[in-house]
Image: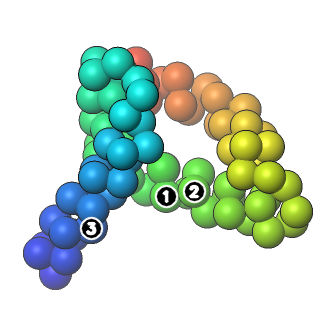
Amino acid sequence: MSDMFGLKKMLTNKLLERQLKSLPEAQREAILKAVNENPDFFNKLAKEIEAEKKSGKSEMAASMEVMRKHQGEIQKIMMGK
């Protein structure tokens, strides 16, 4: 079971790195760290974004809405609190 978790974490990191490649390295590392330390929270965000997309919103609109909704929590995580 832990092997499966390790594989999932590695694949998630590779996917994130590819999507964040245009950001400065320090920002990429901060985001990867936040996601790895709070996987349940970020999975929740992803599910909410998918639900918004299914209701007809674009990925950008869905992402922005969910991010605004959870802005306080995201700020705390990104600041390491």
Q: Position of residue 1 (x, y in %)?
A: 16, 81
Residue 30 visible in the displayed image:
no
Q: Amino acid at mark 2?
A: Ala
- Write down the residue under mark 1: 43
Q: Position of residue 65 (x, y in %)?
A: 77, 40
Instruction: Look at 21% across and 59% down and name the residue there.
Output: 10
Q: Amino acid at mark 1?
A: Asn
What is the crowding at mark 2: few (fewer than 14 residues within 10 Å), some, or many (at least 20)?
some
Discs 3, 1 touching: Cβ within 8 Å: no
Discs 2, 3 touching: Cβ within 8 Å: no
> SS for tag 1?
helix
As rendered, which of 76 and 42 lies closer to the eye? 42
> SS for tag 3?
helix
In whole angstroms, how far apart are the C-alphas of marks 1 and 2?
5 Å
In whole angstroms, how far apart are the C-alphas of marks 2 and 3?
15 Å
- Write down the residue under mark 2: 46
- Write down the residue under mark 3: 8
What is the crowding at mark 3: few (fewer than 14 residues within 10 Å), some, or many (at least 20)?
few
| Farthest-out residue, right | 56
Q: Amino acid at mark 3?
A: Lys
